[in-house]
Amino acid sequence: MAAFKILTAVLAVLCAWYFYNQETFSEEMIQGKRVLVTGSSSGIGEQMAYEFARLGAHVMLTARREERLQQVVQKCRDLGAASASYVVADMSNLTSARRVVEETKNHLEGLDFLVLNHVGGTRFGHFEGTIESVITSMTINFFSYVQLTISALKMLNESQGSIIVVSSISGRVQSPFAVPYAAAKFALEGFYTSLRSELHLRKADLPITVAVLGYIDTDSAVSSVHGKVKMAPSPKEDCAREIVKGGALRQREVFYPYWNIKLALLLRDWQEPVPAGMPVRWAPLRAAPGMRRGPPHCRFRMLSPDPPTSTSFSPLNCTSPKGPA
């Protein structure tokens, strides 16, 4: 009971500190700024484009679908964007990523916010053990982010701009059935947090905001987990607003939905570790009591270690999820 009271008091102090030490966001932080948003033909990227437009920014949008980009650009203009343009690009091609930055420089004559949001080459299901799926995911979801950053660094340094990186809880917590996607997100986290630290040591004024997102109601996310996830997704409009605000305030991290993500990270840190070098077998939840939880659609418990020659992770009798991530 005493420990619970202490924990409650600490949480109360932390909450008070969080709410009373937030810098105030104002529209002037965005008005007139030059912004490149990738993956902006739908989902969170589209909503971020609208948010920047409402605040009077110059927006450059990019995605693969030209017809959708034209529609989003027109709505950005209607919402009050200082200007709105687009460039069609496929981020599985790193040359296309470089071209996007060149087109942005030609149209906007500089850059204040680089917003990296696109996603692709992912599916929700068992890892098939092919290097091609990993290469595809890493190229779109990691290497193209790095290429865009490298290509835009000079402009961002000149404008003392900011980078906003849209990541995922899959980049912080192990994610079975999304292995290539999780690998790319973990790589993003490692690259951008390390780059942020190095820039700070070099006294470079280039803040990097990493947005760690949970389950959001984008078409791609909802369709990929349909029938597999019971929880309701969080609204993409509010998500986009929080990311834009966090980037404008130069926050190191944005968590959305905040408490869901923080709870997931807390549970990760409290999870009982498996002793190093000990091979284990796993069985579904219904097999016996004394269980450890696994993915939402299939629960696991740890059984006795396998013989030293065996190192297996095999969810027995567990229905495989299907569909794109």
Image (cartoon, rainbow, N blue to C red):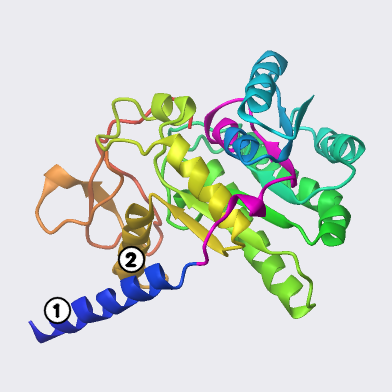
Labelled disc at residue 248: none
Q: Residues within 10 Å of mark 2 (few under 14, many from 20)?
A: few
Q: Quadrant of residue 156?
A: bottom right
Q: Nearer the viewer, residue 144 or 36?
A: 36
When the figure is inspected, residue 244 is found, relative to residue 195, above or below; the finding is above
Q: Position of residue 62 (x, y in %)?
A: 73, 30
Who's the residue at 77% across and 27% down the image? 86
Q: Secondary structure at mark 2?
A: helix
What amino acid type is highlighted by mark number 1?
A: Phe
Would you name the residue on which mark 1 appears?
4
Q: Position of residue 262 (x, y in %)?
A: 36, 61
Which callout, 2 or 1, points at the residue further toward the start of the chain?
Answer: 1
| Region in magenta | 23-48
Who's the residue at 33% across and 73% down the image? 16
Question: In the rendered image, is residue 20 in sight?
Answer: yes
Would you name the residue on which mark 2 appears?
266
